[in-house]
């Protein structure tokens, strides 16, 4: 019978060991499972393969002639892309001090040589299961549970990454702040259950009207934020208007008549030729545009001035 982890989807296992016989043994032991086995006979090659392929798990020999496993693990941990890959040490030394060192260095587990097939599979499955749980926790920690969009913390991280990318590549982007009109009245008149349903459906509309590489988040309360990545002014305005227009299609059943929704939006675009702006600068500009939209009667979009290079002198 296959382990449950093997049934749920393929993972890749990278074996880093200077002994060709170990690689042959790993192929034999893992044959028949839904796992791809990758091989590296040298530590440097192992690190390179790990960074290029991002395997689901690494089997790492502690004692190798060029570089020991602890140094390889250190190099994996210092690189963001490979930092969280579980590493199971392979060791012929059953000394508890050696095992303690392996685990304290950041290893997920260890297997002593000569390797037993049942033990190897069990430890790989346990490490894969733990990684999946950690990834699920990480995803849930970044999601607003009511709307399904990113939460404020995840937005802040994504916005910092967008600003850094803009500074590095010159790619323009837009930031839309969207506020639901008269949301307090909805809660006061129809109850928080209806208000929650409004937020859920607004989240669906924002997700449907933005693109896969945009970042949509619940910014706080009834306010939402969308980072329109790699987008010029005209395209950003088109997407923002489409989102606001689709809010009109939401109708929430109530005791009297269906409740209709509208929102106000403030949009600011950072141009390709802009200087590097701080997050607070861009957010302030979008918030100013949003305030103008609400002051002008709500249910509309106001576009702030495009942020370009600051005047000299």
Image (cartoon, rainbow, N blue to C red):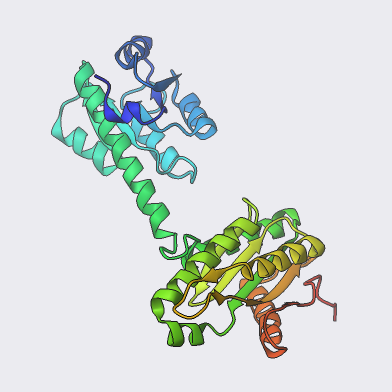
Whether 72 is drawn above or below 249: the answer is: above
Q: Which residue lies furthest to the right in this view?
A: 312
Task: State which quadrant residue 104 falls in.
Answer: top left
In the rendered image, the quadrant that contains the N terminus is top left
> Which residue occupies 67% across, 74% down?
282
Q: Which residue lies furthest to the bottom in this view?
A: 295
Residue 265 visible in the current orientation: yes
Tell me residue 290's x, y (percent): 67, 81
Whether 162 is drawn above or below 123: the answer is: below
Tell me residue 97's x, y (percent): 17, 36
Foreground of the two, 275 or 232: 232
Task: State which quadrant residue 270 falls in.
Answer: bottom right
Q: Residue furthest front?
A: 256
Residue 115 visible in the current orientation: no
Task: State which quadrant residue 163 falls in.
Answer: bottom right
Foreground of the two, 28 or 101: 28
Q: Is residue 268 left or right of residue 117?
A: right
Tell me residue 241's x, y (percent): 73, 68
Tell me residue 100's x, y (percent): 19, 39
In the rendered image, the quadrant that contains the C terminus is bottom right
């Amino acid at each position: 019978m296959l382990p449950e982890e093997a049934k749920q989807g393929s993972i890749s296992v990278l074996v880093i060991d200077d002994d060709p016989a170990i690689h042959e043994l790993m192929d034999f032991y893992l044959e028949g499972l839904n796992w791809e086995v990758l091989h590296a006979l040298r530590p440097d090659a192992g690190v390179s393969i790990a960074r290029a392929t991002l395997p689901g798990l690494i089997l790492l020999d502690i004692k190798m002639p060029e570089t020991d496993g602890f140094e390889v693990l250190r190099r994996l941990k210092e690189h963001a892309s490979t930092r969280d890959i579980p590493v199971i040490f392979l060791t012929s030394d059953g000394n508890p001090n050696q095992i303690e060192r392996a685990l304290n260095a950041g290893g997920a587990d260890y297997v002593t040589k000569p390797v037993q097939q049942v033990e190897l599979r069990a430890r790989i499955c346990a490490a894969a299961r733990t990684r999946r749980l950690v990834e699920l926790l990480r995803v849930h920690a970044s999601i607003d549970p009511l709307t399904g969009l990113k939460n404020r913390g995840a937005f802040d991280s994504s916005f910092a990454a967008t600003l850094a990318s803009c500074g590095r590549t010159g790619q323009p982007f837009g930031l839309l702040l969207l506020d639901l009109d008269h949301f307090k009245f909805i809660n006061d008149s129809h109850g928080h259950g209806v208000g929650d349903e409004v937020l859920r459906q607004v989240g669906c509309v924002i997700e449907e009207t933005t693109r896969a590489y945009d970042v949509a988040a619940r910014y706080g309360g009834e306010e939402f934020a969308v980072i329109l990545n790699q987008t010029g002014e005209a395209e950003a305005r088109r997407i923002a208007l489409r989102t606001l227009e689709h809010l009109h299609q939401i109708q929430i059943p109530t005791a009297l008549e269906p409740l209709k929704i509208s929102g106000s939006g403030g949009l600011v675009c950072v141009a390709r030729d802009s200087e590097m702006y701080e997050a607070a600068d861009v957010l302030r500009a979008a918030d100013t545009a949003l305030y103008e939209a609400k002051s002008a009667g709500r249910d509309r979009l106001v576009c702030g001035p495009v942020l370009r290079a600051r005047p000299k002198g």
